[in-house]
Image (tube, rainbow, N blue to C red):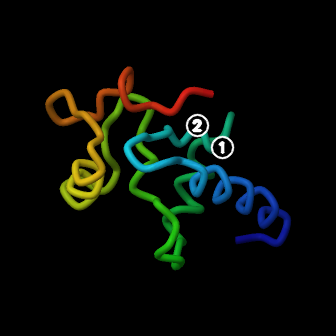
């Protein structure tokens, strides 16, 4: 990651860490205007204490499939079919 992106990445990770158990945020919520940047930050993540699984696509679909779903279900995050019920689980701004 370029050095100039480091402060931005730290802000993304701060927002991810601030997402409480049982709730989710979208990539765009943690990186407004640049959801793919959040995806890049999380894809390079090595710190297992960061709750990466609480970040989902805006439509509630999961980037990491069954593994992510199992972690979210263990926290009580509601689903509607294959997607997170964003109306119920999305952390309010």
Residue 25 in picture, x, y percent from top left: 50, 39
Q: Residue furthest left?
A: 81
Neighbourhood count class around disc 1 (C-alpha, 10 Å): few under 14, some 14–19, many 20 upward: many
Q: Is residue 82 left or right of residue 47?
A: left
Q: Which structural element holds mark 2? A: helix
Residue sitting nearer the eye, 27 or 3: 27
Residue 11 in picture, x, y percent from top left: 74, 55
Q: How many numbered callouts?
A: 2
Residue sitting nearer the eye, 47 or 91: 91
Residue 24 in picture, x, y percent from top left: 44, 41
Pointer 2 residue: 28
Are the two marked residues, 2 and 1, in contact with CB atoms closer than 8 angstroms?
yes
Q: Residue at left 60%, top 51%?
A: 18
Q: Is residue 12 left or right of residue 6?
A: left
Q: Which mark is residue 14?
A: none
Pointer 1 residue: 31
Q: Is residue 8 left or right of residue 65?
A: right
Q: Residue at left 71%, top 60%?
A: 9
Quadrant assignment for the N terminus: bottom right
Q: Residue at left 20%, top 56%?
A: 70
């Amino acid at each position: 990651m370029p050095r100039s992106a480091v402060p931005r990445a730290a802000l993304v990770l701060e927002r991810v860490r601030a997402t409480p158990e049982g709730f989710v945020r979208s990539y765009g919520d943690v990186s407004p205007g640049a959801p793919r940047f959040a995806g890049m930050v999380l894809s390079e993540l090595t710190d297992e204490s960061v709750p990466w699984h609480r970040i989902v696509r805006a439509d509630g679909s999961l980037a990491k499939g069954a593994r992510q779903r199992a972690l979210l279900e263990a926290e009580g995050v509601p689903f509607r079919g294959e997607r997170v019920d964003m109306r119920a689980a999305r952390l309010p701004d």
